[in-house]
């Protein structure tokens, strides 16, 4: 149990560091070098493509290698390299994006391997990135003055992962295997499709939730805290009360809160907490559906995040940001996820028989 907590705790801290570092690279190093709106959009799409969409192929590779800590360590080195080549914006985007993807996949598979098909530990792991992202975006210009200290921190993190984790994580390794087409057919395919659609919608809705009161520093901090708490509590409550029950109740309540949060920060913070409770639930359902190929499952969820972010990155409005759109969007997401969770429960029962 202590080793479990040590692994989850360390990966969660490093998740915070990696996301903060990538935000610093993009805001303090890349942004000043790209001129014009189109160049800025290209740079950020390029970074997000490598950071999120590429977790799918990297996840497949990680499944084959079965050296998750090493994959994460290489990710730390790639992010460090992004700081070093600080005059070539597109190369920085690619290096930081690849590093982010590799770290997330390696850490994600290790945490899923020790999760015992439960959502609590993955929920803790995915939650800390939001804090790092917030601090990196908000204080990028301050942190960049300590650039070489940041690089050293990343290199130390990579060394720590290689030497401390390669030995420990072997106790929990479940010999991942290459994804077989027959494993994602029929019921499994429908479950994964529901998860994918749900995450796409959650990603898109998360980007358009741009309430005016978020410009207030204290409220913006509380909003981020709501994101973090939601991811943590979603896994804990999902394990205790059932994934299907928690995702349904949390999304329906979040639809009401977020829909009427335009003038109420309290409703907005509560709504985003409830909204994010589904994140570890979707992750663990995908992982358990493809239990022998967790890297592929993890990458599938982050590909969905990227797909959901594309409209915002391209400045395309699909849904207007108003009460009706937010409520309808979240409710549809709840229905799709309920179908996926229902089929997942049924599949788990059938496998026990």
Image (cartoon, rainbow, N blue to C red):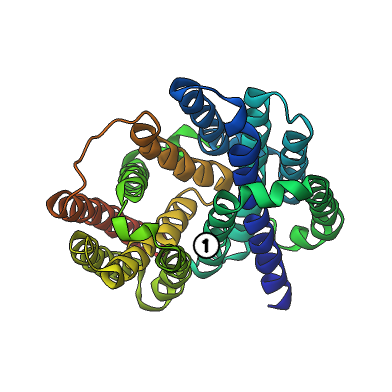
In the depicted structure, whether residue 28 falls above or below residue 276 = above
Task: Name the secondary structure under disc 1.
Answer: helix
The residue closer to the viewer here, 308 or 316, is: 316
- Residue 231: x, y in percent? 45, 65
- Residue 237: x, y in percent? 40, 75
- Residue 333: x, y in percent? 25, 51
Q: Residues within 10 Å of mark 1 (few under 14, many from 20)?
A: many
Furthest residue toward left:
324
Asked if one can make out residue 18 in the rendered structure from this viewpoint, the answer is: no
- Residue 138: x, y in percent? 55, 53
Residue 112, image quadrant? bottom right
Q: Quadrant of the C terminus?
A: bottom left
In the depicted structure, whether residue 165 falls above or below residue 304 = below
Per the image, the residue denoted by label 1 is 127
Q: Is residue 53 left or right of residue 213?
A: right
Asked if one can make out residue 267 in the rendered structure from this viewpoint, the answer is: yes
């Amino acid at each position: 149990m202590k080793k479990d907590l040590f692994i989850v705790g360390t990966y969660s801290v490093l998740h915070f560091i990696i996301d903060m570092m990538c935000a610093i690279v993009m805001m303090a190093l890349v942004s000043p070098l790209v001129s014009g709106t189109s160049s800025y959009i290209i740079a950020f799409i390029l970074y997000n493509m490598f950071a999120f969409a590429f977790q799918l192929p990297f996840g497949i590779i990680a499944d084959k290698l079965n050296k998750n800590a090493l994959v994460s360590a290489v990710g730390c080195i790639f992010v460090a390299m992004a700081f070093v080549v600080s005059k070539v914006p597109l190369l920085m985007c690619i290096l930081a994006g690849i590093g982010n993807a590799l770290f997330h996949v390696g850490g994600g598979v290790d945490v899923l391997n020790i999760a015992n098909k439960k959502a609590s530990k993955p929920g803790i792991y995915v939650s800390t990135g939001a804090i790092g992202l917030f601090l990196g975006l908000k204080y990028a210009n301050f942190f960049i003055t300590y650039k070489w200290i940041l690089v050293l921190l990343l290199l130390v993190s990579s060394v720590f992962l290689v030497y401390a984790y390669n030995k420990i994580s072997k106790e929990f390794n479940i010999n991942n295997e290459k994804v077989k087409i027959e494993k994602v057919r029929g019921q499994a395919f429908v479950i994964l499709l529901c998860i994918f659609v749900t995450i796409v919608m959650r990603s898109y809705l998360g980007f358009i939730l741009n309430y005016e009161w978020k410009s207030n520093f204290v409220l913006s901090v509380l909003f981020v805290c709501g994101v973090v708490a939601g991811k943590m509590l979603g896994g804990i409550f999902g394990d205790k009360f059932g994934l299907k029950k928690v995702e349904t109740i949390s999304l329906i309540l979040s639809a009401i809160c977020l829909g009427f949060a335009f003038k109420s920060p309290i409703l907005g913070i509560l709504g985003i907490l409830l909204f994010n409770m589904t994140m570890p639930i979707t992750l663990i359902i995908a992982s358990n559906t493809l239990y022998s190929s967790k890297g592929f499952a993890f990458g599938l969820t982050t590909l969905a995040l990227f797909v959901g972010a594309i409209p915002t990155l391209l400045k395309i409005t699909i849904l207007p940001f108003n009460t009706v759109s937010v409520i309808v969007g979240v409710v549809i997401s709840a229905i799709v996820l309920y179908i996926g969770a229902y089929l997942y429960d049924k599949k788990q029962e059938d496998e026990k028989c």
